[in-house]
Amino acid sequence: AQSVTQLGSHVSVSEGALVLLRCNYSSSVPPYLFWYVQYPNQGLQLLLKYTTGATLVKGINGFEAEFKKSETSFHLTKPSAHMSDAAEYFCAVSATGRRALTFGSGTRLQVQP
Amino acid sequence: IAGITQAPTSQILAAGRRMTLRCTQDMRHNAMYWYRQDLGLGLRLIHYSNTAGTTGKGEVPDGYSVSRANTDDFPLTLASAVPSQTSVYFCASKPTDLDSPLHFGNGTRLTVT
């Protein structure tokens, strides 16, 4: 079985502040982990992924995430928020990449000027 | 431009009517998926197909059917629509290699009245 929990359905930060979006997963086998971003009225775009190897992964638009097996977490961070980062963010897991992705419920990020 | 095309982009449908959502990809991806997106629930898998000629049930398959006659097309049919099927529907695809991410279409917004 696999599942994802995203803590916080809404996160608000000031422009230039640190962005931290939390994701915890459950998987009985090694997980492949993904973060996707969705802008209004659009499909989902891949931000970054972890499959194997280095546990700190860097993605597009300055985002990065760290896979922590002991904490079953894959939190998304960005040092300095930009207005254009306002969107909904989804964490997703696939057991060894062989199963369809299971998504979290999403976190809507607001960036205040 | 390579990608996934979904049609229609939006539809209002009377309850009890039959509806087929279309999905076509030109990337020659083997695997295709249908997800529905509902507020607070994230994306939930309806049906999937690992390769042409095969399909499988996801997390919320009831009331939906799919077919995969060829690699490119993966239509989703609602045999008799009900208001609880009001949602945004996303088609996605991915190649065979395990660590490849999903590619998403722009979605179909369906309202069942």
Image (cartoon, coloured by chain):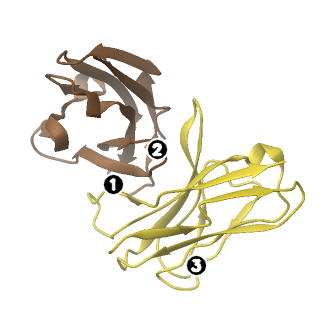
Which residue is found at the position 62% from the left and 72% from the top?
B75
| CB under 8 Å between discs 1 and 2 | no
Residue with the mark numbered 3 = B68
Q: Colour of chain B?
A: yellow
State the separation of the CA atoms marked 1 and 2.
11 Å
Which residue is found at the position 32% from the left and 51% from the top?
A96
Which residue is found at the position 86% from the left and 56% from the top?
B14
Q: Which numbered disc, 3 or 1, marks the residue closer to the eye?
A: 3
Which residue is found at the position 54% from the left and 67% from the top?
B6
Q: Position of residue B90 (x, y in %)?
A: 53, 56
- Looking at the rendered structure, the kind of residue marked 1 is Gly
Q: Quadrant of the C terminus of chain A?
A: top left
Label 1 neighbourhood size at 10 Å, few (<14), some (14-19), many (20+)? many
| CB under 8 Å between discs 3 and 1 | no
Label 3 neighbourhood size at 10 Å, few (<14), some (14-19), many (20+)? some
User: What secondary structure is found at the residue carrying circle 2?
Assistant: strand
Tag count: 3
Badge 1: chain ID = A
Vertical comparison of A52 with B95: above or below: above
Q: Are marks 1 and 2 on the same chain?
A: yes
Badge 2: chain ID = A
State the separation of the CA atoms marked 3 and 1.
22 Å
Q: Position of residue A87 (x, y in %)?
A: 38, 34
Label 2 neighbourhood size at 10 Å, few (<14), some (14-19), many (20+)? many
Query: Which chain is represented by brown in the image?
Result: A
Q: Earlier in the sequence, mark 1 or mark 2?
A: 1
Residue with the mark numbered 2 = A102
- Looking at the rendered structure, the kind of residue marked 3 is Arg
Residue with the mark numbered 1 = A97
What is the quadrant of residue B27 in the picture? bottom left
Q: Are marks 3 and 2 on the same chain?
A: no
